[in-house]
Amino acid sequence: MLKRSQFVGMLLVSLMAFLAAKSQAQSSPRRIIYLEISADSRARVGAQQQWLEMLQGVGADRVVSRTLRDGRVGIEETKMTSATVIKVSGVIAGDRLKLPGGSFSIRDKAGISELLKRLRDDGAEVAMAEKKAFGLTSVQLVALHQRFSQPVNFETKGRKAGEVTAELVKKIGIPFVLDSSARAAVNGDELVLDELRGLSMGTALAAVVRPLGLVIEPKREQGKQLEIHLQDTRQAKENWPVGWPLERVPVAVAPTLFDKIPLEIRNFPLAAVLNAIEKKSGVNFLIDYNTLARKDVDLATTKVTLVENKVALLVAVSNALKQAKPRLSCELRMDEIGKPFLWITSK
C-alpha cells in the first residue's frame, strides 16, 4: 500500500505533467513575416538586387524591394482573424542592412534568420522588448508577480511540504516542471515548520521548498509559454527569492516590532522565545532552516537569556539571535503584496 507521502508526491508530479502538457497543447498564433527593404543614397548600384537574392532564404514569407525616398527602419504588427502579419522594414545603408534589432552585413544570413525566427515565434512585442530578470520582459514579469501575489488562504504549519507545494502550484496556475532532485524532495516526509497563511504565494512557495534544498526559477523558452522550474539550489542560475527588500523605513512597515516591553528570560530555548515574540508582534517569522541545518544550529536546543527593562521587540529578537553559535541574524522583508515578515538566517 502506498504511504500518504508517496501518494502526495505522485499527485504532485502528475499535476506538473498535466499542466505542462496543457501548456504545450495550446498552439501558437500563426504569424506571417513580410520583409521590405529599400536603399538610402549611400547604397551602391545593384545592392538592392544582391540583398533581395540573399534574403530569399532567411525565413520570411515574402521579401520585396522598394524604391523609396523616405525608406525607414521599422516594424508593424497587424492582428487579423486567422493570423498576425508582421511587416519588417529595413534600409540598405552603405554595405549593411539596418533592421529593427540590428545592423547586418550581407554575409550575416544567420543573424537575420534568427531575428525573423524570434519575431515568428514570439511576435514583435515580446521579441523586440528588453529582457529583464529571468529573461522576461517587463510585461511578463508584472504578470508573473501578479500570479505570485495571491494570498495563501490555507494553513501550512505541520503539513507535508510536498502537499503544501502541490496546493500552491495548483492555485498559482502556471505550468511547473520538476527535476529529479525536486521529485525526490517533494516525495519525502519534510514538514512545513512555519505558518504561511496570509503571505503571498510566491514568497510562501519559495519558503516551503527552500528547506528541501530547492528553489523556484521562472523560465521561458523562445516561442513557448512561461514555466516555473522547481530544481536543486545548485542547478539554478536565478531563483525567485523568499521576499523582497523594504520600500519604506522598517518602523512604517512593521510598527509593532518597535513596541517596547520589559523582558526577563533566562536560559530559555530560542525557538520558544521567537515563537512568543512572533505572536506578540503579529508579524510572520520565517526561518531559513536550510542554512541553519548547514550551520548545525538547532533553535530548540539553543538557550538564550534576555533581561531588559524596556526593549523593542525587533531588538530583542536580534539580541537573542546573537547568542546562537554561530550567530544568527534577522532581516525585515516584504512579500509580493507588501506584507512584512522577519527572515531569520545565519550571517
Image: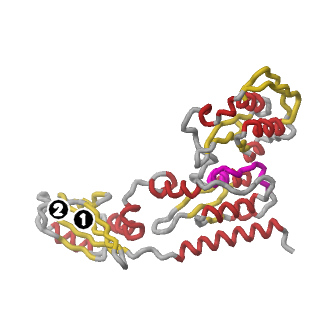
Specify whether residue 166 is painted magenta: no
Q: Quadrant of the C terminus?
A: top right
Say which amino acid is labelled 1. Ser
Say which amino acid is labelled 2. Gly
Distance (Cα) linking label 1 and label 2? 8 Å
Query: Mark 1 near mark 2, Cβ–Cβ under 8 Å?
Result: yes
Q: Is residue 150 left or right of residue 308?
A: left
Q: Look at the numbered disc 1 and give the secondary structure of its residue.
A: strand
Give how far across and how far down residue 160 sits, in percent.
78, 59
Give how far across and how far down residue 131 sits, in percent.
44, 54
- Residue lying furthest bottom in this view? 82
Quick check: 275 above or below 67?
above
* N-term mark: 1 or 2: 2
**To which residue does mark 1 refer?**
89
At x 84%, y 38%, the residue is 272
Nearest the viewer among 12 and 231 is 12
Nearest the viewer among 176 and 337 is 337
**To which residue does mark 2 refer?**
71
